Amino acid sequence: MEGKLKIGGHTFRIIQRDMGNEELGETDFNTGIISIHSKSIRSIKESSLLHEILHVMNPTMDSSEDGHRILESLSEQLYAVYGEHLSMFFDTLLGREN
């Protein structure tokens, strides 16, 4: 299942694919694709998508290890508060799971 999301005037395609054991998600700014690991459990897919959205919103945070840690922390905090309330959002972008 694929979805599309417009962030700051840029349209990104959301895809799920096997990403091996190293990554849960990644954003390719050149192709406009956000990839989420297809073998992750649903909650990890959702929090990973939030993490990747924050990368798009704050691309300069990638330039340091501390910046990436802040994005990781913020995505988990947002997911803890809003995750269950965003089910329609996640279903649209990741597809509905039974």
Image (spheres, rainbow, N blue to C red):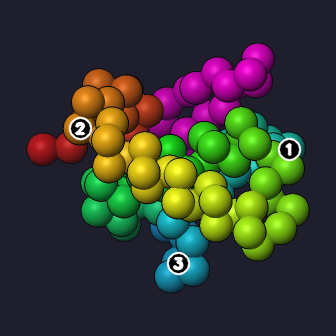
The amino acid beneath tag 1 is Asn
Question: Which residue is nearer to you in this view: 60 or 36?
Answer: 60
Foreground: disc 2 or disc 1: 2
Q: In which quarter of the image is the N terminus?
A: top left
Magenta stretch mostly in which secondary structure? Answer: strand
Mark nearer the N terminus (2 vs 1): 1
Q: What element carries label 1?
A: loop
Q: Please name the residue shown 60% across and 49% down the image.
A: 52
- The region drawn magenta spans 1-15
Residue 29 horizontal side relative to residue 82, left or right: right
Q: Quarter of the image holding residue 98?
A: top left
The amino acid beneath tag 2 is Glu
Residue corresponding to mark 2 = 84
Question: Where does the image place residue 41, in percent across and percent down from the top left?
Answer: 29, 62
**Measured Cα–Cα span from mark 2 to mark 3:** 27 Å
Do residues under tags 3 and 1 come within 8 Å of each other at their CB atoms? no
Residue corresponding to mark 1 = 30
Q: Please name the residue shown 64% across and 21% down the image.
A: 6
Instruction: Decide if residue 59 is in sight here.
Output: yes
The amino acid beneath tag 3 is Gly
Residue corresponding to mark 3 = 20
Foreground: disc 2 or disc 3: 2
**Measured Cα–Cα span from mark 3 to mark 1:** 22 Å
